[in-house]
Image: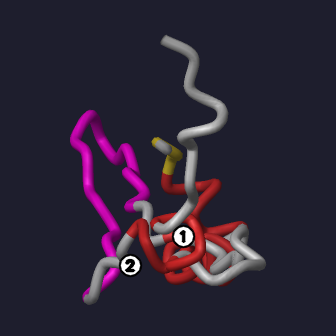
Amino acid sequence: MTINATRLRENIYRILDQILETGIPVQIERRGKILKIVPGNPKSKFDNLVRRNAMKEDPQDYIHIDWSREWKP
């Protein structure tokens, strides 16, 4: 995201909080030059993942399934 210095001044705390939460740097345009505000410890994309338990059964149960009666030559 690129913003100008006026918008940064108006919303500095909200923008800084957003950078900390998302880890996405913000570019500021000032006098034709670009400045960047980046988090000191960038947030990993994996930090946003939510752990889900999709398998209700024991995974070992799937390994020992007998498919011989389903198979047709």
Where is 4 relative to 37, above or below? above
Q: Residue at the location (63% across, 83% down)?
A: 58
Q: Residue at the location (36% across, 74% down)?
A: 44
Q: Between marks 1 and 2, how big is the CA–CA gap?
A: 7 Å
Magenta stretch, main secondary structure class: strand
Q: Nearer the viewer, residue 28 or 57?
A: 57
Outermost residue to the top: 73
Q: Residue at the location (55% across, 76% down)?
A: 59
Is label 1 in contact with label 2 (beta carbons under 8 Å)?
A: yes
11 sits left or right of 34 in the view: right
Query: Disc 1 designates what residue?
Result: 22
Q: What is the span of residues highlighted in magenta in the rendered image?
A: 25-40
Query: Disc 2 designates what residue?
Result: 43
71 sits left or right of 34 in the view: right
Q: Residues within 10 Å of mark 2 (few under 14, many from 20)?
A: some
Give residue 29's quadrant in the image. Answer: top left
